[in-house]
Image (cartoon, grey):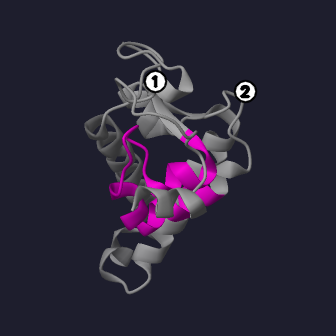
Amino acid sequence: MAGFLDSWTPGSPPGAESAHPGERFGLPAVGVGSVAGFGRRLAGVTVDWLLSYVLTLAVLGLDALGGPTVGWWVWLVWFVITVIPTALFGMTPGMVALGIRVARVDMAATVGFRAVLRTVLLGVVIPAVIRDGDGRGWHDRASQTIVIRSRA
């Protein structure tokens, strides 16, 4: 099954099993620069979603809370506060709070336009919960990124 997935989701170099997540990319096992765990990633995206709700309700007002389109507005705000900071800085507000960031697997300075694809797939949710041995979801594999710890 893994060979099939590798054929259409690039981003992991081929090779033998690694001793720890991120070893294939030259990342350390622990500490700064190591692969961020699922809990930190989930907490970071939760902070971003809550921030999106607050910003949306600040603009639309509390009356919009039960409205039929508020969910789409929240998703749009979340998309914007995720794509722009990720593309430019590799971090969203939630990631900053949790001490993690997005890095390209080739370790280029910025994530750039890959942040759009990554965020669209992350917004669909399912690709984010199906992860490989390096802890990367399909959204990270498709955009050739990995989430790493930015502080201890």
Between 116 and 127, the one lying in front of the other is 127
Q: Residue furthest left?
A: 39
Report the residue at 64% width, 32% height from top: 89
Disc 2 marks a residue whose amino acid type is Ala
> Which secondary structure, mark 1?
helix
Q: Which residue is mark 1?
A: 23
- In the rendering, at what x and y percent does residue 107 appear? 66, 27
Question: Tag 2: Cα neighbours inside 10 Å, few (<14), some, or many (≥20)?
Answer: few
Q: Quadrant of the N terminus?
A: bottom left
Tell me, yes or no, whether the highlighted magenta stretch contains residue 132.
yes
Viewer can see residue 97: yes
Q: Earlier in the sequence, mark 2 or mark 1?
A: 1
> Which secondary structure, mark 2?
loop
Report the residue at 46% width, 24% height from top: 23
Between 61 and 126, the one lying in front of the other is 126
Q: Which mark is residue 109?
A: 2
- What segment carries the magenta color? 117-145
- Magenta segment's dominant SS is helix
Q: Which mark is residue 40?
A: none
Between 78 and 146, the one lying in front of the other is 146
Disc 1 marks a residue whose amino acid type is Glu
Q: Residue furthest front?
A: 16
From the viewer's perspective, is the residue at label 2 or at label 1 nearer?
Answer: 1
- In the rendering, at what x and y percent does residue 56 appear? 46, 63
